[in-house]
Amino acid sequence: LAAAFDFEWSNAHLFYGAYTRTRSYFSNSELASRGLPDEAERTVLLRHGALLGEGACSLLHRLVDRLVDHYGPEVDGLENRLEKLEQRVFAMRPKKNPLRDILQLKADIASLRRVTMPQRDAVSRLARREFPQIPEQLAYRFRDVYDHLVRLTDEALFMQDRVTGLLDAYLST
């Protein structure tokens, strides 16, 4: 049905020319597409032609997979901060009041959960092939990304429990 829609005719005869067709997803911005690709854009397209040739769903998988892979170092950083705070709080006499650091870490972990949980749910739909555009083999690859997001959200929940316990321990002393 969408392929049969004639925007130009509909705009002229039904809407009396009230609308203009956008030529780019990012119209009216510096990211808007303008004409043919320049030399730098052609270089990128040629270098990644095989990836682009696999189709939009495969490209989506590669982008989401790369995005999720970059959460690993951030989670490791949160884990290191938590361990250092635990050592400070359970030291006999902390040199500096760790309350502000505990609350900041708690907020950072909550931010991680706020980001990863909706992503986990969206990737779950892709892995279950709720969309007919997702081929079966690609659904398995999305399942791998989904499993990674499940591990990340579980780690974030576990860290949030630990930092809450750390806060309780600090406040009780």
Image (cartoon, rainbow, N blue to C red):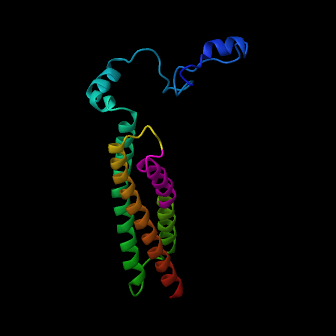
Q: Quadrant of residue 9?
A: top right
16 over 167 or under it: above or below: above
Residue 33 covered by magenta stretch: no
Looking at the picture, does residue 43 appear above or below residue 143? above
Left or right: 10 with respect to 171? Answer: right
In the displayed structure, 100 sits above or below 66; it is below
Q: Main secondary structure of the magenta part?
A: helix
* Viewer-nearest residue: 62 or 9: 9
Camera-nearest residue between 84 and 165: 165
Which segment did they paint magenta?
113-130
Residue 12 in picture, x, y percent from top left: 68, 11
Q: Residue at x 36, y 17 (%)?
A: 38
Q: Residue at x 37, y 61 (%)?
A: 75
Q: Nearer the viewer, residue 66 or 125?
A: 125
Residue at image position (36%, 44%) is 136
- Quarter where residue 56 is shown: top left
Asked whether the viewer can see residue 70, the reply is no
- Horizontally, is 142 left or right of 122 in the view? left
Residue 83 image position (x, y, % from top left):
36, 73
- Left or right of residue 139: residue 105: right
- Which residue appears at 49% of the width and 82% of the height? 170
Q: Quadrant of the N terminus?
A: top right
